[in-house]
Amino acid sequence: MTPTTHAFGNGPPPGEAAAVLMLDPDGVVLRCAGAVPALAGCPPTELHGRRVADLVTEPDVWSGALGAEGEGRRTLRASLLHRDGAPVEVDALVLPLPAGGDARFVVYVAPAAATRCGVEDESLLRALFDQDHIGLAIHGTDLRITRANLDPRFFTPDHQEVPPSGLRLGDLLVPQDAAAIEERLRRVLDTGESVIGWEHPARPLAAPGRERVLAVSAFRLHDAGERAIGVAVMFTDVTEEHTARRRLALLYAAATRLGRTLDVTRNADELAGILVPDFADLVSVDLSDTVFLGREPGGFLPGTRLRRVATAAVDAWPPEIYQRGDTVRAREAESRALRDCRTVHVPDLAALAEELGADAERRRLLFPAAASSALFVPLHVQGSVLGVLGLWRTPDRVPFAHGDIPLIEDIASRAALSLENARRYTTELRTVETLQRSLLPPSGVALSAAESSGIYVPAGNASGIGGCWYDVIELSAARVAFVIGDVAGHGLGATATMGRLRTAVQTLSDLDLPPEELLTHLDDLVVRLGATEPQTQDGGVLGSTCLYCVYDPVAGHCVMASAGHPPPVLITPDGCHTGVDLTPGPALGTGTMPFEPVELALAPDSVLAFHTRELRLDDSSTEPLHARMAAAAVSGSPPAGIGRAALDQALTGPPADDVALLVARVRTLPEGATSAWELKADPSIVGEARRLIIGQLADWGLDELAFTTELIVSELITNAIRYAKPPIVLRMIRDKSLICEVSDASQTQPRLRRARLMDEGGRGLFLIAQLAHRWGSRYTSTGKTIWTEQRLTS
């Protein structure tokens, strides 16, 4: 049974619906009449002599109502016990009688439904003026408060019970809030246009640090003559609802905006943008260098190096604190709580400055001049701190409170997760890029035949990295091979495939095959690999492209062939530039057409620029790019400078696909660096060949190599006379090593074997292999050539 007020309005219930009980001072029923059978299920006589507390479900409340002090009437909501056991909800009106008689109380009892309609109107009005959730205020035409229903302490939270009548809002609220609300009320008074559910801060003047938001509805009041006499205002404290909506809005923004990119800086910018101005006036995001480097974050120690990667401000970012891009280092006092992954709440920055003794460095870190409160939130994942989120509010706003910490920690947790994903992505990106670069040759190679520079530019994201490659391979006879290719697909799979293709080309190049034949062998290899290794999302060997070019510095010409790769750009010494007229064959593993070679005569200091398709140097619209490369080449820039000139103009940002560029400036060997003789196929010429080479070595000042060279040449010429066909050509080349070549018309390749003890022959090539640093053979258009290289001692 619950006591109520005003349950009966201004009088007792109708007689036909009510029962009347007369009670003594102890609550015993002396007499009863009326609707007792309907309410209690028994005749009135059965109630005589019984305590009324025994007739209800909650006797203590009833006894308390009878024992209350005072002579005023009392109303109750009760549940009578019907004879059949079912409770009957009733309203009771208790009227005390003068003391001294046997009867002390008269009680009217009626069904609750019978009393409800009669009191609803009065209850509504009383609820508006008596309850403490919906405020009702009347403002006169001067906007002074003439009447209000709330406790005066609602307007003066310092508990001064000063009624608001006669006061303006400026006497009760902080100036900016009061001015905004009065401006809306004046508009209602002037125009008659009502305001419904308008929400606005209404911070008490006596407690400006306490956040309060009101939902205001206002309408104009008129007298009988339709003249405006004031404004009626209904307002509700919706601070909790407003805070909840703001929390949900911020959480929704964090959920939808954070993590959309795998770029660390953009995630930090999004975080700062979400929090300003809805949550803070100033926000900074400081991250550890490990996040940018993709390394695992370590412990957050004093002096840990952080980088301020993002800032946001309602107005301009204060110049007196760390700026975007600055290096930030926290001290012991600042880092202790962050190391434990706890949020640091500073409701009063001035008090903290006095406590810490804010020197100039600490002020740059923690104390913007315009800020009054702050939060410092660690951005951590699984106990590892990635950085710090700093937030400040100015005195115009409510200082940060403990209730703000769960919200900002939730947002910071989401931000830290997005930053961790970006860090892991950076790790993957650097892993792929590091593997890709480790599989490429040194960027700069200086040989007698050419000076070259290879440039690799990774894509802006991990999905575009992997597959582009180049190579510079030393061949026999001081020749050099330039290789460039691109693997279908991206990622680690494409990088691994690129490494295998580069190894295959390196192996095939040792056979000294013409470019078109080498690509044919490479195509066969790709077909075999493609049959056993299906294409994946990361790519595969099928569809890869490759261009192979061989340059001979003795003859000053090159031969090249392409498997689906764009031709290079040729820049002559006088600055003329053009794409090489080369028709690429099918990509590796995708066709059966032969690879057609192209031969070019190159003047010394000519430049060849080999490139991947992404750079589009073969496009007709790249004339300015060709011209810039030519200008760099004519000015004497090294290959690396020519390549940088091309990339500076061709790439305006990180490419969508990785790019490779190989620039080579070709040379010819100096005059007198080669000698060649055509010999008869007669054993007598072996002695003559010895005399020729001894004389040439004397001219070159290489007398110390005479003995070994005599042995090598004797064996090669003897084998050519015995097993090959004329003509026999002996050639010597002085380069970084001494090269001796013997060419004949036979297509039979020599084979190194170990002779048995009783064998008369079979030791020639074994002897050559012991005397020479390197040796080998290659096919030519007229037969074959066997060559050796000996290291020069000076």
Image (cartoon, helix red, strand yellow):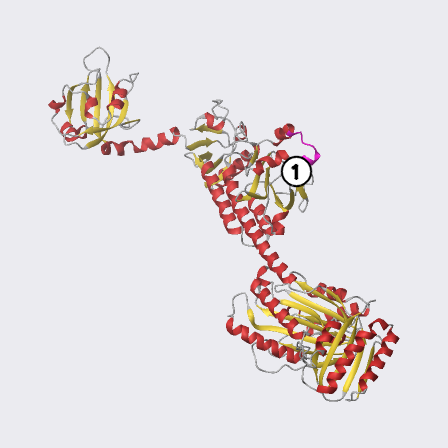
Task: Kindly tell me whether residue 459 is visible in this rendering.
Answer: no
The quarter of the rendered structure image containing the C terminus is bottom right
| Rendered image quadrant of residue 565 | bottom right
Q: Outermost residue, front direction? A: 758
Is 357 a magenta residue?
A: yes
Magenta stretch containing residue 608, yes or no? no
Answer above or below: position of 324 versus 495.
Answer: above
What secondary structure prevails in the magenta region? helix
Image height of 165 relative to 525, above or below: above
Which of the two residues, 736 or 705, is positioned nearer the viewer here?
A: 705
Query: Considering the numbered disc 1 on the image, is that residue within a helix, a strand or a loop?
Result: helix
Q: Position of residue 190 (x, y in %)?
A: 51, 39
In-front residue for pair 250/409? 409
Q: Position of residue 67 (x, y in %)?
A: 27, 17
* Identity, as a three-letter code, of the amino acid under mark 1: Leu
Q: Nearer the viewer, residue 582 or 20?
A: 582
In percent of width and height, residue 598 lies at 70, 81
Q: Which residue is mark 1?
A: 365
Q: Is residue 735 above or below residue 332?
A: below
Q: Which residues are magenta?
A: 356-363
Question: Is 698 situated left or right of 484 in this image?
Answer: right
How far across and how far down the image is residue 575, in percent?
80, 73
Which residue shows up at 48% across the image and 23% down it? 159
